[in-house]
Image: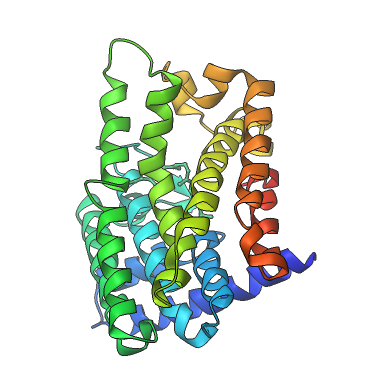
Amino acid sequence: MSDFATALHSAAEKIEARLAAEIAALPDSQVRDAMAYAARGGKKLRGFLVMESARLHGIAPEISVQAAAAIEAIHAYSLVHDDLPAMDDDDLRRGQPTVHVKWDEATAILVGDALQSLAFGLLARDDAAPTPQGRLALIASMAQAAGGAGMVLGQALDIEAETATAPLSLDEITALQAGKTGALIEWSACAGARMAQADTAPLAAYARALGLAFQIADDILDVEGDAALAGKRLHKDACAGKATFVSLLGLDGAKARAQDLIVQAQAALKVYGDDAAQLRDAAQFVIARSN
Ligand code: GRG
């Protein structure tokens, strides 16, 4: 494994264990079991960004793992709700039946709600940041990133686009994705600076380019990933006539744009020097990934 893959794997294990322990401490219930199921697996890339950004600011992993678990709880909630019949209506997530398929829709709604509450609870813990001001900054910015000015807004725009008379323009799809997937990625990359009450601007610039590259890579994977080639991945957006970065830029254009964004993301990290090597590698990983 490369240094980056080892670092991502090691962070993912810590984050997953933290999240599993939090969920296991809840009263025994079906919703608790389904939360544990929804929180398992995945790359834990957002949590990794939190821990790397914290390390850049001299914050120990024992502290940053709380915020890393919190963002992964929010991400897991968003996936459970996104998979619901009222939204994307997906049967599989991370290679397993989705929560509403394995249990039912009511359980899936409650799992998302409870994961979101869990996330805010984690950020409010004494050990979520070195100072109360740091914790408050994490909580306030999470409310912004996850809510009606961030991820939820992006998701709402995406749903509206399904019934729009014309496909979205490049600017519109870029704005939609900045909320839907970009806001949580930006929160993650800025989290360490917030904990330390330091400048978030270089990390925000990094994350904005990274988030967009991530979404473009997702659109590319939809048309040429291993699963797509095997006919297993449903590229619903393209099938539904919805605009994607690939439909708007062409496959080669989308790849070139993603690569440009990675160069841009890496350039934004200059101020941190060699300390930001893992974040630079994370950017490359985002466009080279196969899932
Ligand atoms: C329901 C409010 C609400 C929001 C949902 C994030 C989101 C908004 C929907 C996800 C739809 C989707 C599959 C978007 C493509 C990009 C994306 C977020 C992929 C999943 O993220 P990964 O690849 O997943 O980081 P893992 O499984 O590795 O955690």
Tell me the quarter of the picture where residue 223 sits.
Answer: top right
Query: Which one is in front, 3 or 266?
Result: 266
| Position in image of residue 53 (x %, y %) | 53, 69
Query: Which one is in front, 40 or 178?
Result: 178
**For residue 243, side relative to residue 257 (left or right):** left
Outermost residue toward the top in this view: 165
From what the image shows, is residue 255 above or below residue 170? below
| Position in image of residue 45 (x %, y %) | 55, 60
Outermost residue toward the right in this view: 1
Taking the spot 26% from the left edge, 80% from the top edge, the residue there is: 124
**For residue 135, side relative to residue 275 (left or right):** left
Taking the spot 26% from the left edge, 41% from the top edge, the residue there is: 153
**For residue 121, side relative to residue 76 (left or right):** left
| Position in image of residue 23 (x %, y %) | 34, 78
From what the image shows, is residue 80 above or below residue 256? below
Taking the spot 57% from the left edge, 23% from the top edge, the residue there is: 246
Residue 55 appears in the picture as rendered: yes
Q: How is the image coloured?
A: rainbow
Q: Which quadrant would the N terminus be assigned to in this image?
A: bottom right
Total numbered badges shown on the rendered structure: 0
| Position in image of residue 5 (x %, y %) | 72, 64
From what the image shows, is residue 221 above or below residue 48? above
**For residue 64, side relative to residue 227 (left or right):** left
Query: Which one is in front, 131 or 144?
Result: 131
Residue 85 appears in the picture as rendered: no
